[in-house]
Image: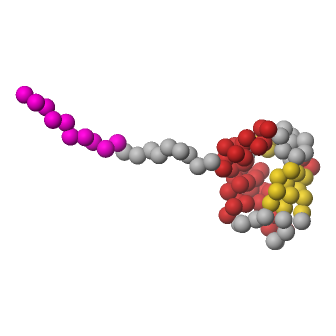
Amino acid sequence: MKTLKLYEMFNSDTLRNRSTAASIVKDMAKFKSEKIIFDFENISFISRSFAHELLSNLKEKDIDFQFVNTNHVIDTMFRISSIKPKFVFSTPVKKKIEIKA
């Protein structure tokens, strides 16, 4: 088991972009099949793009992980980032209109 203390890694209480998440994932390659603990102690905010990038990579690489010391904002961003949209954009179907004379 390996614990990543994110505040110590980035010396910031906010994690805002995909490149930050990508650098974490790159570092995770060193740990092979170990469970990764992401410690969010002293982190007050993560962006949706950070959350999405991290979750996508964890899922893609099938990594065993756990988040600890998260706050409401962080939990919400992870929840939002893991939900698939409930709407679909599509071309509207054209209906035939009859005009009565």
Vertical placement of residue 84 versus 26, above or below: above
The answer to which quarter of the image holds residue 2 is bottom right
**What secondary structure characterizes most of the magenta part?**
loop
Vertical placement of residue 78 versus 100, above or below: below
Residue situated furthest right in the rendering: 8
Left or right side of 52 for 8: right
Name the residue at 84% across, 65% down. 35
Evaluate whether residue 10 shows in this view. no
Left or right side of 12 for 84: left
x and y percent of residue 25 in the render?
A: 77, 60
Name the residue at 88% across, 46% down. 69
Name the residue at 67% across, 47% down. 81
Q: Quadrant of the C terminus?
A: top left
Name the residue at 40% across, 46% down. 90
The residue nearer to you, when weighing 97 against 26, is 97
The answer to which quarter of the image holds residue 30 is bottom right
Segment colored magenta: 92-101
x and y percent of residue 29 in the render?
A: 80, 67
The residue nearer to you, when weighing 79 against 44, is 79
Magenta stretch contains residue 69:
no
Evaluate whether residue 13 shows in this view. yes
Vertical placement of residue 101 versus 53, above or below: above
Residue situated furthest bottom in the rendering: 32
x and y percent of residue 55 in the render?
A: 71, 55
Q: Quadrant of the N terminus?
A: bottom right
